[in-house]
Image (tube, rainbow, N blue to C red):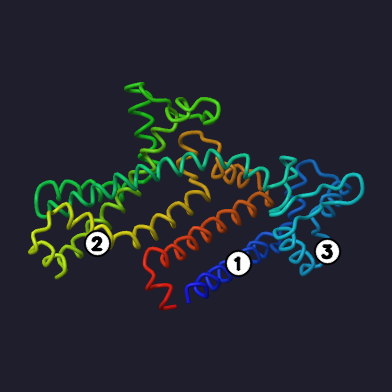
Amino acid sequence: MRLRFIVSRILGALVVLLLIAAACFAIFYLMPTNPAQLSCGKPCSPERLAEVERYLGVDQAWWKQLVDFLAGIIGGRTFGEGATAIHCNAPCFGYSFRLRDSVTALILDRLPVTLSLTLGAAVLWAIGGIAAGLLAALKRGTFTDSAVMGAAITGISAPTYLLGLLGVLLFGFVLNVLPIGGYVPLTENPALWAFHLILPWVVLAIANGAIYARLTRGQMLDVLSQDYIRTARAKGLSETVVVGKHGLRNLVVPLTTLFAIDIGGLLGGAVITEKVFALGGVGTLLLESVASLDIQVIVGVTLFAAAVVIIANLIADLSYSVLDPRIGAAR
Protein backbone atom coordinates (compact mmCIF):
# COMPACT_ATOMS: atom_id res chain seq x y z
CA MET A 1 0.00 0.00 0.00
CA ARG A 2 2.81 2.39 0.82
CA LEU A 3 4.48 1.75 -2.56
CA ARG A 4 1.19 2.45 -4.33
CA PHE A 5 0.83 5.66 -2.32
CA ILE A 6 4.34 6.81 -3.28
CA VAL A 7 3.94 5.96 -6.98
CA SER A 8 0.55 7.69 -7.17
CA ARG A 9 1.97 10.84 -5.60
CA ILE A 10 4.95 10.93 -7.98
CA LEU A 11 2.79 10.39 -11.06
CA GLY A 12 0.34 13.01 -9.86
CA ALA A 13 3.17 15.51 -9.38
CA LEU A 14 4.46 14.88 -12.91
CA VAL A 15 1.00 15.36 -14.41
CA VAL A 16 0.49 18.62 -12.52
CA LEU A 17 3.90 19.89 -13.63
CA LEU A 18 3.15 19.13 -17.29
CA LEU A 19 -0.22 20.87 -17.02
CA ILE A 20 1.42 23.95 -15.50
CA ALA A 21 4.03 23.93 -18.27
CA ALA A 22 1.28 23.79 -20.88
CA ALA A 23 -0.59 26.62 -19.13
CA CYS A 24 2.53 28.80 -19.04
CA PHE A 25 3.09 28.13 -22.73
CA ALA A 26 -0.49 29.10 -23.54
CA ILE A 27 -0.38 32.30 -21.49
CA PHE A 28 2.92 33.63 -22.78
CA TYR A 29 3.34 32.16 -26.26
CA LEU A 30 -0.22 32.32 -27.56
CA MET A 31 -0.90 35.90 -26.49
CA PRO A 32 -1.35 38.56 -29.20
CA THR A 33 2.15 40.00 -28.64
CA ASN A 34 4.87 38.28 -30.65
CA PRO A 35 7.43 36.72 -28.22
CA ALA A 36 10.09 37.04 -30.92
CA GLN A 37 9.45 40.78 -31.15
CA LEU A 38 9.97 41.13 -27.40
CA SER A 39 13.19 39.09 -27.54
CA CYS A 40 14.54 40.88 -30.59
CA GLY A 41 14.96 44.21 -28.84
CA LYS A 42 15.10 47.66 -30.43
CA PRO A 43 15.84 48.41 -33.16
CA CYS A 44 14.83 45.12 -34.77
CA SER A 45 14.98 44.68 -38.53
CA PRO A 46 12.57 42.31 -40.31
CA GLU A 47 15.50 39.99 -41.08
CA ARG A 48 16.54 39.89 -37.42
CA LEU A 49 12.94 39.32 -36.34
CA ALA A 50 12.59 36.39 -38.74
CA GLU A 51 15.84 34.93 -37.38
CA VAL A 52 14.61 35.18 -33.79
CA GLU A 53 11.27 33.62 -34.77
CA ARG A 54 13.12 30.65 -36.26
CA TYR A 55 15.30 30.33 -33.16
CA LEU A 56 12.30 30.37 -30.83
CA GLY A 57 10.21 28.21 -33.12
CA VAL A 58 7.28 30.62 -33.01
CA ASP A 59 7.00 30.44 -36.80
CA GLN A 60 5.64 26.89 -36.36
CA ALA A 61 2.04 25.80 -35.70
CA TRP A 62 0.95 26.25 -32.06
CA TRP A 63 0.73 22.50 -31.41
CA LYS A 64 4.27 22.01 -32.75
CA GLN A 65 5.48 24.82 -30.48
CA LEU A 66 3.82 23.15 -27.47
CA VAL A 67 5.34 19.75 -28.29
CA ASP A 68 8.81 21.29 -28.70
CA PHE A 69 8.38 23.24 -25.47
CA LEU A 70 7.42 20.17 -23.41
CA ALA A 71 10.02 17.99 -25.14
CA GLY A 72 12.69 20.55 -24.29
CA ILE A 73 11.83 20.34 -20.61
CA ILE A 74 12.11 16.56 -20.67
CA GLY A 75 14.98 15.93 -23.08
CA GLY A 76 16.58 19.23 -24.03
CA ARG A 77 16.20 21.35 -27.13
CA THR A 78 18.19 22.92 -29.95
CA PHE A 79 17.42 26.47 -31.05
CA GLY A 80 18.25 27.38 -34.64
CA GLU A 81 20.05 25.39 -37.31
CA GLY A 82 23.54 24.85 -38.63
CA ALA A 83 26.58 26.61 -37.25
CA THR A 84 24.50 29.14 -35.31
CA ALA A 85 22.43 26.48 -33.53
CA ILE A 86 22.30 26.68 -29.75
CA HIS A 87 21.66 23.54 -27.68
CA CYS A 88 19.87 23.77 -24.35
CA ASN A 89 20.25 20.76 -22.06
CA ALA A 90 17.30 19.29 -20.16
CA PRO A 91 15.43 20.64 -18.37
CA CYS A 92 15.34 23.39 -20.97
CA PHE A 93 13.08 26.27 -19.97
CA GLY A 94 14.01 28.34 -23.00
CA TYR A 95 16.75 30.64 -24.24
CA SER A 96 17.16 34.35 -23.45
CA PHE A 97 18.37 36.37 -26.41
CA ARG A 98 18.67 39.39 -24.15
CA LEU A 99 21.16 37.67 -21.83
CA ARG A 100 22.57 35.27 -24.45
CA ASP A 101 22.20 32.20 -22.25
CA SER A 102 19.77 29.38 -21.53
CA VAL A 103 17.14 30.12 -18.91
CA THR A 104 18.20 27.03 -16.97
CA ALA A 105 21.77 28.32 -16.73
CA LEU A 106 20.53 31.74 -15.63
CA ILE A 107 18.43 30.19 -12.86
CA LEU A 108 21.25 27.93 -11.68
CA ASP A 109 23.59 30.92 -11.59
CA ARG A 110 21.22 32.82 -9.26
CA LEU A 111 20.05 29.81 -7.26
CA PRO A 112 22.84 29.81 -4.61
CA VAL A 113 21.71 33.27 -3.46
CA THR A 114 18.08 32.23 -3.09
CA LEU A 115 19.11 28.94 -1.46
CA SER A 116 21.26 30.76 1.07
CA LEU A 117 18.49 33.22 1.87
CA THR A 118 15.75 30.60 2.12
CA LEU A 119 17.55 27.91 4.11
CA GLY A 120 19.09 30.33 6.59
CA ALA A 121 15.76 32.03 7.22
CA ALA A 122 14.04 28.64 7.46
CA VAL A 123 16.31 27.55 10.30
CA LEU A 124 15.56 30.76 12.19
CA TRP A 125 11.79 30.72 11.73
CA ALA A 126 11.43 27.00 12.46
CA ILE A 127 13.46 27.07 15.68
CA GLY A 128 12.22 30.46 16.84
CA GLY A 129 8.59 29.93 15.87
CA ILE A 130 8.25 26.47 17.39
CA ALA A 131 10.04 27.53 20.58
CA ALA A 132 7.81 30.61 20.93
CA GLY A 133 4.68 28.54 20.32
CA LEU A 134 5.68 25.96 22.93
CA LEU A 135 6.43 28.69 25.44
CA ALA A 136 3.04 30.32 24.85
CA ALA A 137 1.22 26.98 25.17
CA LEU A 138 2.97 26.04 28.41
CA LYS A 139 2.32 29.53 29.82
CA ARG A 140 -1.28 29.69 28.66
CA GLY A 141 -3.25 32.58 30.09
CA THR A 142 -0.20 34.41 31.42
CA PHE A 143 1.47 37.62 30.35
CA THR A 144 4.09 35.55 28.49
CA ASP A 145 1.37 33.91 26.41
CA SER A 146 -0.21 37.26 25.56
CA ALA A 147 3.15 38.83 24.72
CA VAL A 148 4.19 35.98 22.41
CA MET A 149 0.85 35.90 20.59
CA GLY A 150 0.77 39.69 20.31
CA ALA A 151 4.23 39.65 18.76
CA ALA A 152 3.14 36.85 16.42
CA ILE A 153 0.10 38.79 15.20
CA THR A 154 2.29 41.84 14.64
CA GLY A 155 4.81 39.75 12.69
CA ILE A 156 2.12 38.26 10.48
CA SER A 157 0.47 41.63 9.84
CA ALA A 158 3.63 43.60 9.01
CA PRO A 159 4.46 43.59 5.26
CA THR A 160 7.83 42.03 4.46
CA TYR A 161 9.00 45.05 2.48
CA LEU A 162 8.20 47.33 5.43
CA LEU A 163 10.16 45.13 7.84
CA GLY A 164 13.04 45.10 5.37
CA LEU A 165 13.10 48.86 4.97
CA LEU A 166 12.89 49.39 8.74
CA GLY A 167 15.73 46.91 9.24
CA VAL A 168 17.88 48.69 6.66
CA LEU A 169 17.14 52.07 8.23
CA LEU A 170 17.78 50.97 11.82
CA PHE A 171 20.70 48.55 11.53
CA GLY A 172 22.24 49.90 8.34
CA PHE A 173 22.03 53.66 8.80
CA VAL A 174 21.13 54.55 12.40
CA LEU A 175 23.19 51.92 14.25
CA ASN A 176 25.45 51.09 11.28
CA VAL A 177 26.18 47.58 12.56
CA LEU A 178 25.01 45.43 9.63
CA PRO A 179 25.45 45.61 5.84
CA ILE A 180 22.32 46.71 4.02
CA GLY A 181 22.75 44.61 0.91
CA GLY A 182 24.99 42.57 -1.33
CA TYR A 183 25.93 38.91 -1.37
CA VAL A 184 29.23 37.16 -0.67
CA PRO A 185 29.43 33.50 -1.84
CA LEU A 186 29.73 30.91 0.91
CA THR A 187 32.74 29.35 -0.78
CA GLU A 188 34.54 32.70 -0.89
CA ASN A 189 34.17 33.77 2.74
CA PRO A 190 31.73 31.92 5.06
CA ALA A 191 31.90 34.62 7.75
CA LEU A 192 31.05 37.45 5.34
CA TRP A 193 28.42 35.25 3.71
CA ALA A 194 26.56 34.94 7.02
CA PHE A 195 27.23 38.56 8.02
CA HIS A 196 25.61 39.92 4.85
CA LEU A 197 22.60 37.62 5.23
CA ILE A 198 21.81 38.15 8.93
CA LEU A 199 19.38 41.00 8.32
CA PRO A 200 17.57 39.37 5.36
CA TRP A 201 17.30 36.13 7.35
CA VAL A 202 15.71 37.86 10.32
CA VAL A 203 13.29 39.89 8.18
CA LEU A 204 12.19 36.84 6.22
CA ALA A 205 11.92 34.72 9.37
CA ILE A 206 9.68 37.13 11.29
CA ALA A 207 6.44 36.57 9.38
CA ASN A 208 6.97 32.84 8.88
CA GLY A 209 8.12 32.33 12.47
CA ALA A 210 4.96 34.05 13.69
CA ILE A 211 2.82 31.58 11.73
CA TYR A 212 4.74 28.67 13.23
CA ALA A 213 4.30 30.10 16.72
CA ARG A 214 0.52 30.32 16.35
CA LEU A 215 0.25 26.86 14.79
CA THR A 216 2.50 25.28 17.44
CA ARG A 217 0.57 26.89 20.29
CA GLY A 218 -2.80 25.81 18.93
CA GLN A 219 -1.71 22.24 18.22
CA MET A 220 0.07 21.87 21.54
CA LEU A 221 -2.93 23.15 23.54
CA ASP A 222 -5.13 20.67 21.70
CA VAL A 223 -2.74 17.80 22.43
CA LEU A 224 -2.26 18.71 26.09
CA SER A 225 -6.03 18.58 26.60
CA GLN A 226 -6.27 14.95 25.47
CA ASP A 227 -7.06 12.13 27.89
CA TYR A 228 -3.81 10.26 27.31
CA ILE A 229 -1.82 13.33 28.33
CA ARG A 230 -3.76 13.54 31.58
CA THR A 231 -3.13 9.82 32.08
CA ALA A 232 0.61 10.30 31.52
CA ARG A 233 0.69 13.08 34.08
CA ALA A 234 -1.31 10.98 36.55
CA LYS A 235 1.32 8.25 36.23
CA GLY A 236 3.90 10.71 37.51
CA LEU A 237 5.74 11.45 34.26
CA SER A 238 7.63 14.71 34.28
CA GLU A 239 6.32 17.66 32.27
CA THR A 240 9.42 17.45 30.08
CA VAL A 241 8.61 13.86 29.12
CA VAL A 242 4.92 14.61 28.61
CA VAL A 243 5.61 17.58 26.34
CA GLY A 244 8.71 16.24 24.60
CA LYS A 245 7.68 12.63 24.01
CA HIS A 246 3.91 12.81 23.71
CA GLY A 247 3.15 16.40 22.80
CA LEU A 248 5.76 17.23 20.17
CA ARG A 249 5.20 13.95 18.34
CA ASN A 250 1.77 15.15 17.24
CA LEU A 251 3.22 18.38 15.85
CA VAL A 252 5.54 16.67 13.39
CA VAL A 253 3.09 16.07 10.53
CA PRO A 254 1.43 19.54 10.37
CA LEU A 255 4.74 21.34 10.86
CA THR A 256 6.43 19.19 8.19
CA THR A 257 3.65 20.10 5.76
CA LEU A 258 3.94 23.80 6.46
CA PHE A 259 7.74 23.74 6.34
CA ALA A 260 7.85 21.98 2.96
CA ILE A 261 5.34 24.40 1.44
CA ASP A 262 7.19 27.44 2.82
CA ILE A 263 10.57 26.23 1.57
CA GLY A 264 9.14 25.45 -1.86
CA GLY A 265 7.52 28.84 -2.18
CA LEU A 266 10.60 30.78 -1.16
CA LEU A 267 12.99 28.79 -3.36
CA GLY A 268 10.82 29.86 -6.25
CA GLY A 269 11.93 33.39 -5.51
CA ALA A 270 11.83 35.48 -2.34
CA VAL A 271 11.20 38.46 -4.60
CA ILE A 272 10.55 41.23 -2.09
CA THR A 273 13.38 40.37 0.30
CA GLU A 274 15.88 39.98 -2.52
CA LYS A 275 14.87 43.34 -3.96
CA VAL A 276 15.08 45.23 -0.64
CA PHE A 277 18.53 43.86 0.18
CA ALA A 278 19.92 43.89 -3.38
CA LEU A 279 20.41 40.13 -3.51
CA GLY A 280 20.72 38.88 -7.06
CA GLY A 281 18.70 35.70 -6.64
CA VAL A 282 16.00 33.98 -8.66
CA GLY A 283 13.41 36.50 -7.51
CA THR A 284 15.53 39.38 -8.74
CA LEU A 285 16.00 37.60 -12.07
CA LEU A 286 12.22 37.41 -12.41
CA LEU A 287 11.79 41.13 -11.69
CA GLU A 288 14.48 42.07 -14.19
CA SER A 289 12.87 39.86 -16.83
CA VAL A 290 9.43 41.37 -16.28
CA ALA A 291 10.89 44.87 -16.58
CA SER A 292 12.62 43.97 -19.86
CA LEU A 293 9.73 41.78 -21.15
CA ASP A 294 12.03 38.77 -21.49
CA ILE A 295 9.26 36.22 -22.03
CA GLN A 296 11.55 33.17 -22.10
CA VAL A 297 13.01 33.95 -18.67
CA ILE A 298 9.60 34.80 -17.21
CA VAL A 299 8.23 31.45 -18.37
CA GLY A 300 11.33 29.61 -17.16
CA VAL A 301 11.32 31.11 -13.67
CA THR A 302 7.57 30.55 -13.39
CA LEU A 303 8.00 26.89 -14.27
CA PHE A 304 10.98 26.55 -11.94
CA ALA A 305 8.98 28.04 -9.06
CA ALA A 306 6.05 25.75 -9.82
CA ALA A 307 8.33 22.71 -10.00
CA VAL A 308 9.93 23.53 -6.65
CA VAL A 309 6.54 23.96 -4.97
CA ILE A 310 5.29 20.68 -6.46
CA ILE A 311 8.43 18.82 -5.39
CA ALA A 312 8.22 20.31 -1.89
CA ASN A 313 4.60 19.19 -1.58
CA LEU A 314 5.56 15.77 -2.91
CA ILE A 315 8.28 15.45 -0.27
CA ALA A 316 5.77 16.48 2.39
CA ASP A 317 3.29 13.86 1.15
CA LEU A 318 5.92 11.13 1.07
CA SER A 319 7.18 12.08 4.51
CA TYR A 320 3.70 11.40 5.89
CA SER A 321 4.05 7.70 5.18
CA VAL A 322 7.32 7.69 7.12
CA LEU A 323 6.26 9.89 10.03
CA ASP A 324 2.80 8.32 10.27
CA PRO A 325 2.60 4.90 8.52
CA ARG A 326 -1.20 4.91 8.94
CA ILE A 327 -1.50 7.55 6.20
CA GLY A 328 0.30 5.48 3.56
CA ALA A 329 -1.50 2.31 4.62
CA ALA A 330 -4.91 3.96 4.45
CA ARG A 331 -4.35 5.03 0.87
Question: Could you tell which of marks 1 and 3 lies nearer the N-terminus?
Answer: 1
Question: What kind of element bears circle 3?
Answer: loop
Kind of residue at badge 2: Gln
Nearer-N-terminus badge (3/2): 3
- State which tag comes first along the sequence, 2 or 1: 1
Q: Which mark is residue 219?
A: 2
Residue at image coords 46%, 34%: 277
Image disc number at residue 14: 1
In the image, taking residue 309 as reference, residue 66 lies left or right, namely right
Where is residue 115? Give x, y as percent: 51, 42
Seen from this angle, which residue lies furthest top?
A: 176
Mark 1–mark 3 Cα distance, whole angstroms, equals: 26 Å
Residue underneath mark 3: 60
Which amino acid type is marked by label 1?
Leu
- Residue 130, compared with residue 177, is above or below; it is below
Q: Position of residue 126 (x, y in %)?
A: 34, 48
Mark 3 residue type: Gln
Q: Residues within 10 Å of mark 3 (few under 14, many from 20)?
A: few
Q: Which numbered disc, 1 or 3, marks the residue closer to the eye?
A: 1
Specify whether 162 is left or right of 143: right
Please tell me how many numbered marks the rendered image carries.
3
Q: CA distance from mark 3 to mark 2?
A: 55 Å
Q: Which-is-in-front pick, marks 3 and 2? A: 2
